[in-house]
Image (cartoon, coloured by chain):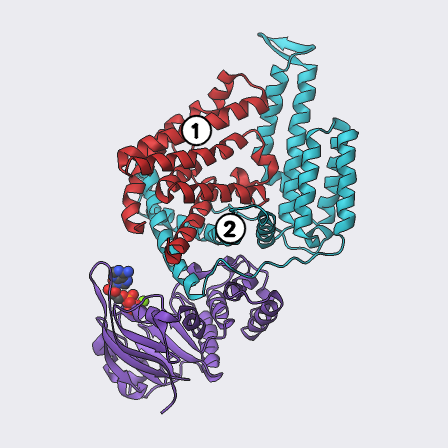
Chain colours: A purple, B cyan, C red
Amino acid sequence: MQESIIDINAICHTFSDGYIGIKNISVSISKGEFIILAGKNGSGKTTLLRHLNGLLLPDSGIIFVNGQDVSKHLIQTRKTVGMVFQDADTQIVGDTVFDEVAFGLENLKVKRAKINEKVTLILENLNLLHLKDRSPSTLSGGEKRKLAIAGILVMDPEVIMFDEPFSNLDYPGTLQVLSTIIKLNRSGHTIIIATHDVETIICEATRIIIMEKGLIKEDGEPDRIVKYLESYGVKEPCSSKFGLGLQPWLT
Amino acid sequence: MAHVTPFTYRQGQSLLHLLDVRCKFFIICIVSMSLLSAHLPACFFYFLMLLFFFKKSGLNIFATLNSIKYFILLLFFVFIARALTVKGDIIFSFYGISITGQGLNEGFLVAFKFFLVMLTGLLFSTTTQPSSVKSAVQWFLKPIPFVPEKRVAVMISLSLSFMPVILKQAKEISDAQKARCADLQKNPVKKIIRLVLPLLKKTFLSADSLVLAMESRCYSDDRTDPEFLPSGKEIPFLIGSFIISLSLVWL
Amino acid sequence: MNSSKQLRMTVYTSLFVAFIAIGAFIAIPVGPVPIVLQNMFVLLAAIILGPVWGLSCVAIYLLIGLAGLPVFAGGTSGIGKLFGPTGGYLLGYLPAVFVTAGISKGLGKKMSSDVIAMLIGSLIIYAAGVPWLKVVTSMTYEKALAVGMYPFLIGDALKIIAAAFIAKTLRPVIKL
Ligand SMILES: Nc1ncnc2c1ncn2[C@@H]1O[C@H](COP(=O)(O)OP(=O)(O)O)[C@@H](O)[C@H]1O
Ligand SMILES: [Mg+2]
């Protein structure tokens, strides 16, 4: 058994309008896992992710990140657990690519020289350095998504959560983002991807969690879980349907 | 709406591009002020100098003039109004309206000065990145009490990155309505509401997710200061602009 | 105010700065004079953001224009525009937004009080803009009013009615 990094203990969340978003969820996530959080729209994936870095706090239950209670260590949690949001357009704060990536470090009051060094390194790794003076709004969909990833990576998170990372992306954009995510996992990051479309990534995943109506319905290895997907309103990958097993999407 | 390009900044490596933005701000202030009390020959002299700098920064003066054509029209109007109302030696008159020599002179001078101040500002904004403008604003606000200059700087960045998003969504909304024949709507109040209300609703939702994105990147008002990269030519430029200002006032 | 609420107001205020800037470019074709939406966004900022955030909204808008970012009408900016013939209207936004927000808040954010507040706000904008126009162009008052106020009054009335409806629908959505 690997060392666990996130421990969720019996959390519930009720929204202010009385809707119950999360119903008594307990999960433990280990270092280095690649998890797909699947479920149809409205099943509570986004709500669960937001609990993991303290954007939402549970009404009851408790979440530990690296053994620390999230509600008492918000800043530390947000450094450890980064979140890439669904809509790349609405998470851009900076007016150049460089400033956008630097934003998180500026919030932590890191020294300017250190910021410049780190941002340059990250942009280089993600192949974005040539765009550093561009206005983010002029980037392509895939580049924007990678920029959002860069803005999170620069804070050295151990866990990176993606909310619907492939929505609204064209084929080349999907490829760019997919290979970036795979690289991140290989370099030791724990990855959690919330999606209603598992086909692109299922082959890379080490675990699938299926949610429905705020509950966790299935949790296990992709080979075993894949057959249940359609009963929860998630499309089963073609290769598996045709009895070919799980085929990598990225060839 | 599509032709609106909210930013006039052009990339480049000219002297003016590289000059420290605070120095440029300062020069604009003293030169604009001394322009106010300048006489016609000095204004022409200054105009020639502006043309020189436009050329040197690789900018097309005609394209620039075209971009401010409405302002020029307004200045023409100021010129006419002055020419008609200032008392003096009548050059010619008809139906009780008379144009005076003093009026023509004064009208021309006033309009010309506004034009020059405008051109100076354009030279500045075409050679200065919006993000360095923001940094300079923060730097100049710092000594003013009760103004949270760091938050103001973040707000400037945010509003600059909202602008393209709003324009894009405005276009989407108006296209979607055209497809449903909303053009036939004659009631102007309804016309306004049908464009603006969905636009505000949509962008406020984006703003909500931006708040979350900023929180998850540890937003704080207490952040790293911006950095300025002087080109080393600031002192000669400052001295030069002092000389120009003085000659504008005395010539 | 807790930090999360403050961050939300910061972002909303920046959003309205962007709307005011873009309002100079969004025109609705009605009759011979197209209705430009900028002053409507100023008034909306007032009744939605309240006096303090509303005032900082307009102040930041003017500041970025003054600092040389092309956010004033016609894609222009700078001292030349702010102190040019139409600069009075721009500076008039400052007292207008504050007073409008104060009245709307004081009278309880109903539609009728919003309309009154915005009417007074519009008048303040003209009270600053028209004399300024008169001085810079040295026109008579009659002429300044004829070119700088009367042609826009009908459009303003329409905008105020629209803005009152918009504010009424928007307030519950954004839960301030
Ligand atoms: N702020 C909120 N107030 C009330 N209900 C909400 C709120 N946010 C989400 N919900 C509801 O919670 C449910 C789960 O939403 P979400 O986690 O976004 O689902 P998913 O990401 O799986 O599509 C949805 O039915 C949604 O309507
Ligand atoms: Mg979701």
Residue C30: image quadrant is top left
Give the structural element (helix, strand or loop) at label 2.
loop
Of circles 1 and 2, the one toward us is 2
- Asked whether mark 1 lies closer than 8 Å to ligand 1, one says no
Give the quadrant of the C terminus of chain B. top right
Give coordinates of residue B150: x percent, y percent: 53, 54
Amino acid of disc 2 = Pro
Q: Is residue C141 visible?
A: yes
Q: Residues within 10 Å of mark 2 (few under 14, many from 20)?
A: some
Who's the residue at 63% across and 67% down the image? A113
Mark number displayed over residue B247: none
Who's the residue at 70% across and 52% down the image? B19
Q: Is residue A13 left or right of residue C84?
A: left
Q: Is residue B153 left or right of residue B37?
A: left
- Asked whether mark 2 lies closer than 8 Å to ligand 1, one says no
Give coordinates of residue A116: x percent, y percent: 60, 67
Which residue bears the numbered disc 1?
Answer: C124
Query: Measured along the vertical axis of the image, is residue B201 above or below residue A111?
Result: above
Give coordinates of residue C24: x percent, y percent: 47, 39
Q: Residues within 10 Å of mark 1 (few under 14, many from 20)?
A: many
Give the structural element (helix, strand or loop) at label 1.
helix
Q: Is residue A216 left or right of residue A90?
A: left
Which residue bears the numbered disc 2?
Answer: B148
Spot the residue most to the front.
B145
Who's the residue at 46% across and 45% down the image? C17
Amino acid of disc 1 = Ile
The Cα–Cα distance between marks 1 and 2, rounded to whole angstroms, is 28 Å
- Quadrant for ligand 2 reads bottom left
Q: Chain ID for label 2?
A: B
* Residue placed most toward the observer, C14 or B202: C14
Q: Chain ID for label 1?
A: C
